[in-house]
Amino acid sequence: MLSELYTGGVLDAAAAIPPARRLDAPQASKTKISRVCGSEVTVDLSLEGDVVSEFGMEARACALGQAAASIVARNIIGARAGELYALRDAMREMLKDNGAPPSGERWEDLSVLAPIRDYPQRHASTLLVFEAVCDCLDQLRKRQD
């Protein structure tokens, strides 16, 4: 039942989303929208070398999208680009291929989103923030080439 998704950890994470804050001069920005539900997440990102130094975000999303965005926003500063690509891939695998939730102190809270795997129509909104972050990283890599 869909109501099982909107329990404790998910609602707590969604409620803890930091206030919307866009960066004045991000190195990269990306907006992602779920065609299924209309959830929208915009990410602003700046790196120092290969490490996230600044992060801004605005999320107009369902509780699942907000929960994912909240956990990312609270933990992304100091993360390396490779770690973030691996995180996106782990989230995709968790949702689409019954993989294990991301682990490690920084990302272990994402395990509250594991029940979403049983609701494919909710995957897109949950993955928005991860896709937007990696699109920003792709923009920065293209500039370096």
Image (cartoon, grey):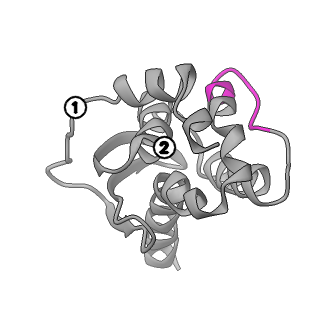
The answer to whether residue 122 is left or right of residue 1 is left
What residue span does the magenta drawing correspond to?
101-109
Report the residue marked by disc 1. 19
| Residue 105 belongs to magenta span | yes
| Few, some or many residues within 10 Å of mark 1 (<14, 14–19, 20+) | few
| Residue 13 belongs to magenta span | no
- Residue extending farthest to the left is 24
- Magenta stretch prevailing secondary structure: loop
| Residue displayed at 59% across by 63% down | 121
139 versus 76 height, above or below: below
Task: Using the image, tell me which numbered label, if any, was put on residue 64.
Answer: 2
Q: Amino acid at mark 2?
A: Leu
Contact (CB < 8 A) between labels 1 and 2? no
| Near-viewer residue (83 or 30) | 30
Report the quarter where the N terminus lies.
top right
In what element is the residue under mark 1? Answer: loop
| Near-viewer residue (144 or 139) | 139
